[in-house]
Structure formats: C-alpha cells, structure tokens
C-alpha cells in the first residue's frame, strides 16, 4: 500500500479587475487511485509578487498585468 500526496494547479481563471484566481488541488493517492482530495483558491492581483507561482500562472500574470492594468487596479482600490 503506497500513499502519495500530489499537489497541482488545476484551474486558472481571470476574474474581475484582471485578478488571476488560482485553484490548487491536493490529492491523496493509494496505489495510484485517488482516495481523498481538497481544493484551495487564492488570488493574484495586479501588482502582487507572483514569482513563487506555477509557471502557467506566471505566464498569464506577465501577459495580463501590464503597467496600465496595475495602475487601473490600484486606482479602483482607492475609490472602493
């Protein structure tokens, strides 16, 4: 009986104000068969440090979070 813990980014969405929502799945496998799983979500907002993110998330952030988008996001936070 071999147990294995697998953590993967399984969903990346662009949501309001160009925020990137990342869903991470943690699965427990027994002999290659998933016996348990849970999800965690977090947001990467324009201007946030995304250097520790998954390579796919980094690529999306680099493309989406332009200086103009970051400025607009920060301006919207001030008025909110």
Image (cartoon, rainbow, N blue to C red):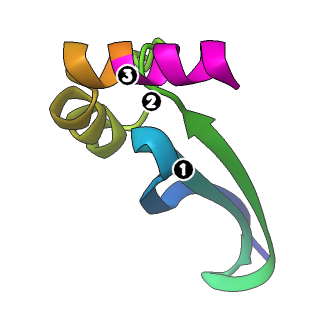
Judged by its main secondary structure, the magenta piece is helix
Q: Gap between marks 2 and 3, in whole Å?
A: 23 Å
Q: Vertically, is 79 above or below 10?
A: above
Q: Is residue 65 left or right of residue 33?
A: left
Q: Which residues are magenta?
A: 72-80
Q: Residue tagged by mark 3?
A: 72
Name the residue nearer the viewer: 44 or 34: 44
Q: Quick one: label 3, few (<14), some, or many (20+) residues within 10 Å?
A: some
Across and down, in percent, residue 29 comes to 71, 74
Query: From this viewpoint, which residue is outermost toward the front?
Result: 79
Which residue corresponds to the image point at 21% horizontal and 27% vertical from the top-left?
62
Which residue corresponds to the image point at 44% horizontal and 59% vertical from the top-left?
13
Which residue corresponds to the image point at 66% horizontal and 42% vertical from the top-left?
42
Q: Is residue 65 visible?
A: yes
Residue 53 shows which numbered tag?
2
Q: Is residue 20 visible?
A: no
Q: Vertically, is 29 above or below 46?
A: below
Q: Label 2 near label 1: C-beta < 8 Å? A: yes
């Amino acid at each position: 009986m071999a147990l294995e813990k697998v953590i993967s980014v399984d969903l990346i969405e662009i949501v309001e104000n160009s925020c990137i929502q990342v869903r991470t799945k943690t699965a427990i496998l027994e002999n290659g068969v998933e016996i348990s799983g849970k999800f965690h979500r977090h947001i990467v907002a324009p201007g946030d440090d995304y250097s520790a993110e998954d390579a796919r998330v980094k690529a999306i952030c680099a493309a989406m979070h332009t200086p103009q988008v970051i400025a607009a996001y920060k301006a919207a936070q001030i008025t909110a």
